[in-house]
Amino acid sequence: MCTPSPPKPLAGLPTSAGTVLLCMALALVAPCVRAAGLRVLTADDTPAAAQFVRQLRASAGVGERFVLERSDAPSGVSPRSGTGDGADEDPLAGVRTRGLRAAAAPDAPVTVAVGLAAAQSAIERPGHEALVLAMLSRLDYETLQSQPALRRAGRPVGVLLRDPALADQLALIAAVLPQKRRLGVVVATESEPMVRELQQAAGGFDLRVEYAPDASSLAAALRRLVASSDALLVLPDRIGDNQAATLAVLRAGATAGLPVFGTNEGLVRSGGLAAAVSTPAQLARQAVLLGQTLSASRGTSGADSLRVESALPVSVRVNANVARELDLRLPDEKTLAAQVIGAR
């Protein structure tokens, strides 16, 4: 029986040894998952979700069970299921189901819910199969915590956040700007859990945090930040997820000659300097490992405890044009990614 060692749950900074063990486990996860099968629940049609699902499907061995369900389908239509033989090029095309309350297949004991809508429905389903809630933001997780069904006795549940830990973002900023310590962050009022995480990981950074409860207060908050910061960081909250608000931060940084860091590739393409990210394919491989660990824990002490993991495989994205405008000579993206991982 193939049972990988479980990764350390999210609790502060992961150790370098833990990171190495995770990478080794990810390399071995494909043959491990083939004994289990996967049920995937999704209501998300974004390209990132589609790539995530395709990687999950690729993780299934030839002839092994793979069930894909949609939550937005009309009633009375059967779910599409199949085997990992690559027969269907688009794993989301034409999928229709009775909804997310269908009974789990006996040979698919690991269920992966993709995105917040699917996660909200999945945790209300009957059954005790291992459940992975993936592609979630930190604020999505805070929303789910209010649902009592998230902690049902006898059901192991794992939450996989779509973004790397904020400590990784700080490690990237330190690698890019080793002499700059004043970091400005503008956040929404409901982002206090992320602010606490940022403060715990800040180390030698001098954090300058401004709250912007609404759009009218954003401009004033940014004026205060750019006057006292060496760089700006956009968190994955209501400001970071809003295109207009993100562009306002980018314009403020560009006007003041300050680099702007973020947590997604879109911000880097739009004018941010750099971001530590985890790709959908990387997240899918981590989700498979987490599901295998949860499935192996069923029936053991603490099997119904909730595990929360940040995205651990990290890639770095850099906007080379912005770097030139700021007169910065940066290492390549792979070197920066290695430095981020080495700082754990």
Image (cartoon, rainbow, N blue to C red):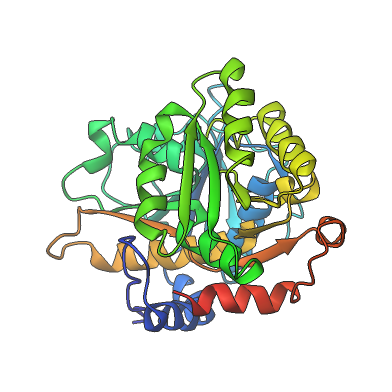
Q: Residue furthest front?
A: 227
* Residue 75 at x, y percent in the picture: 53, 22
The answer to which of 103 and 123 lies nearer the viewer is 123
**Residue at left offset 79%, top offset 72%:** 329
Visible in this render: residue 159?
A: no
Name the residue: 58% across, 33% down.
224
Q: Quadrant of residue 190?
A: top left
In the image, residue 15 above or below residue 38:
below
Q: Is residue 273 visible?
A: yes
Q: How many marks?
A: 0
Q: Position of residue 140 (x, y in %)?
A: 44, 37
**Is 162 above or below relative to 335?**
above
Q: Residue 47's x, y, as percent? A: 72, 45
Residue 124, picture quadrant: top left
- x and y, in percent, of residue 86 in the image: 71, 63
Instruction: Identify which residue, 10 or 328, lies in the foreground.
Output: 328
Q: Is residue 222 left or right of residue 302?
A: right
Q: Quadrant where the C terminus lies?
A: bottom left
Residues 70 and 341: in front is 341
Of the 4 image quadrants, the one containing the N terminus is bottom left
Task: Indicate the quadrant where residue 238 lies.
Answer: top right
